[in-house]
Image: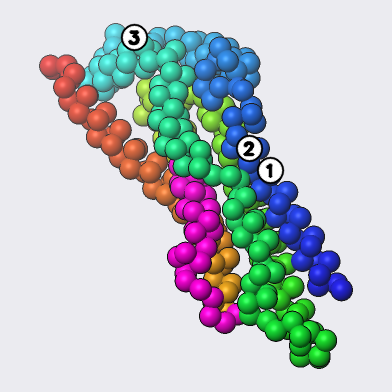
């Protein structure tokens, strides 16, 4: 029967998706550090390029500030640039350390949830029990009647659709966690250049772009990890939460609700990471204004 074959293929795909997710979120996926150049050759080589370029850029900016100060081109604005330049020059070589503090903080929360996640194993087991659901909601002695055959095909089709959607969702989660590694590596490599862009008002927008991306990719794992944990918890509880199945629709509820939480988790993961970045940016701007006010030169 075609419906049975499709349901079996979809179930196998969901299992493979769960295995892929388990591998990606496990400590064995990669031993490379998120931010430490000593434990990540990719970051070490990349920082060697960007830090060398930034050092030349800082010299040029210092020359510009010196000329502007001598010729009194910008007055107080030049003095503010000098303060910002000194702070950035001190911090730029420690940018991987600063990035590491933020990433480590997000990883602590993320790993709290992921330590309880089995890569969708509970969800897959829940969908694997679809036959029990079918037996609850369907009378097998009618399977050889026309109506019974239609019902059987429908149930197999529902099973195939659920498992296929689960496969796609698990694949997307695995992709997010996989690309999170790559994105953070790239952003750490670019961090010295981003810090240098903060000095001049005309280039500060590039700092803002970098900071937004860094916060989003750092904390997207927290939201996704939370919804993965919540979905697996709901799948594990099963009828303990929803009560005994009463009818076919109620029988599928324990499978649909965790899947719905996973799908919403993907959406919330992307949205909340952007909201978090905006909040952090707002706080950093306020802190920057406060620091400038406290260190303002008397004119």
Q: Is residue 192 above or below residue 119?
A: above
Q: Which residue is mark 2?
A: 24
* Picture coordinates of residue 290, whole percent (x, y): 20, 28
The N terminus, quarter of image? bottom right
Figure quadrant of residue 125: bottom right
- The residue shown at (60%, 80%) is 248
- The residue shown at (53%, 53%) is 232
1 and 2 marks in contact (CB < 8 Å)? yes
Mark 1 to mark 3: distance in Å? 56 Å
- The residue shown at (34%, 9%) is 66
* Picture coordinates of residue 177, whole percent (x, y): 58, 40
| Disc 3, SS | helix
Mark 2 to mark 3: distance in Å? 51 Å
Residue 266 appears left or right of 164? left
Q: Which residue is mark 1?
A: 20
Report crowding for label 3: few under 14, some 14 to 19, many 20 or more residues within 10 A (C-alpha). Answer: some
* Bounds of the magenta segment: 222-248
- The residue shown at (65%, 37%) is 23
Answer whether residue 185 is visible to the viewer in this image.
Answer: yes
Figure quadrant of residue 123: bottom right
- Residue 1 painted magenta: no
Mark 1 to mark 2: distance in Å? 6 Å
Q: Is residue 61 above or below residue 118?
A: above
Q: Which residue is mark 3?
A: 66
Labels 1 and 3: the sequence-earlier one: 1
Labels 2 and 3: the sequence-earlier one: 2
Residue located farthest toward the right when viewing the structure as drawn:
1
SS majority, magenta: helix
């Amino acid at each position: 029967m075609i419906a049975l074959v499709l349901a079996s293929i979809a179930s196998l795909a969901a299992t493979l998706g769960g295995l892929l997710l388990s591998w990606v979120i496990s400590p064995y996926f990669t031993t490379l550090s998120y931010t430490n150049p000593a434990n990540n050759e990719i970051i070490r080589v990349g920082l060697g390029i960007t830090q060398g370029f930034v050092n030349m850029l800082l010299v040029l900016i210092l020359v510009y500030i010196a000329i502007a100060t001598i010729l009194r081109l910008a007055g107080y604005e030049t003095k503010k640039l000098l303060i910002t330049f000194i702070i950035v020059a001190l911090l730029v070589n420690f940018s991987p350390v600063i990035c590491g503090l933020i990433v480590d903080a997000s990883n602590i929360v993320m790993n709290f949830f992921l330590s309880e996640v089995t890569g969708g194993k509970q969800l897959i087991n829940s969908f694997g029990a679809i036959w029990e659901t079918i037996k609850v909601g369907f009378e097998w002695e009618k399977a050889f009647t026309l109506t019974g055959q239609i019902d059987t095909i429908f149930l197999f089709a529902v099973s195939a659709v659920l498992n296929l959607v689960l496969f796609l969702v698990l694949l997307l989660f695995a992709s997010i966690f996989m690309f999170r590694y790559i994105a953070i590596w790239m952003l750490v490599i670019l961090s010295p250049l981003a810090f240098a862009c903060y000095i001049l008002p005309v280039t500060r927008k590039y700092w803002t772009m970098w900071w937004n991306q860094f916060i989003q990719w750092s904390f997207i794992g927290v939201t996704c990890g939370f919804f993965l944990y919540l979905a697996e918890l709901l799948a594990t509880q099963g009828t303990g939460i929803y009560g005994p199945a009463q009818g076919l629709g109620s029988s599928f509820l324990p499978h649909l609700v965790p899947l719905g939480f996973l799908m919403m988790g993907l959406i919330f993961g992307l949205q909340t990471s952007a909201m978090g970045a905006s909040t952090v940016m707002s706080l950093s701007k306020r802190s920057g204004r406060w620091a400038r006010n406290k260190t303002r030169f008397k004119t």
